[in-house]
Amino acid sequence: MITAVIIDDEQKNVSMLVSLLQQYCPQVTLLGTANSAAAGKKLIESLSPQLVFLDVEMPYGNGFDLLQSMPGIDAEVIFITAFDQYALTAFRYAALDYLLKPVNIEELEGAIGRAEQKIKEKNTIRNYELLLRNLEEKDTIKQTIALTDRGQQHLVALGDIMYVIADGSYTHIHTVNKVIVTTRNLKDFENIFPTAIFCRIHHGHIINKHHIAKIQKGKGGHVIMKDGKVLDIAFRRKEDFLKMVLR
């Protein structure tokens, strides 16, 4: 069982989420609700839940204000938001879950399943700190992404990622310092990496243009990365790749 609280200023949203949890998520025991960041902080401090459903946009202090006021929070958080794409990408970089309003049942079940696993891993506090830093940092190249390799979490600056290669059910992230192997698929990285910097030049790999040493011409051609790695460019992706490099 997972103990949980809901922090949301709109009662209709609270009622809907309570109903969904009762119908579809019997492993979640709801301990209480709060309608503001201040009340939510008191609720968390008094009940010590394992999971917090946190509305991002609330008057008189939003969800991020609550996190900043509780630097040692020891609970998994599922954010509930109607935020723009920039903020959603920040959640993904920090490996944190969010639910878009109105809440989708399958997404709710998936987020709770991932929360159960994260509660066991205890990487929570570091991920919240990463989220807040990335929201403040407007230069995408300086933002950081959380990557898990065999249960160990690595925080990597986007600018340090040279290229990403798919390998069956795994993805190899080659950084300037090390190689990280993750179970996240290549499409996931393609969706969240900034397109001004990263380009999928082949069905099996994505490159960071700042780490290209040389471009070899041909029907598709290939790139030579600064570490000497040679990567093919798919013919159908060549035009988009050259546009990105020349920006």
Image: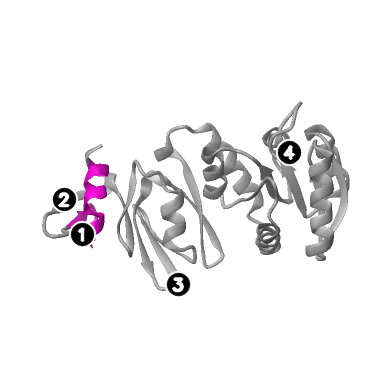
User: Residues in magenta?
Assistant: 222-245
Residue type of the residue flagged with mark 4: Met
Mark 2 residue element: strand
Mark whose residue sits in front, 4 or 2: 2
Q: Residue at x 82, y 45 (%)?
A: 14
Q: Residue 214 shows which numbered tag?
A: 2
**Residue 3 in sight:** no
Residue under label 4: 70
Looking at marks 1 and 3 on the same chain, the residue that comes earlier in the sequence is marked by: 3
Q: Are marks 4 and 2 in contact (CB under 8 Å)?
A: no
Looking at marks 4 and 3 on the same chain, the residue that comes earlier in the sequence is marked by: 4
Residue under label 1: 235
Q: Are marks 2 and 1 in contact (CB under 8 Å)?
A: no
Residue under label 3: 169
Left/right of residue 245 with respect to residue 83 in the rendered view: left
Q: Residue at x 88, y 44 (%)?
A: 46
Q: Is residue 229 magenta?
A: yes
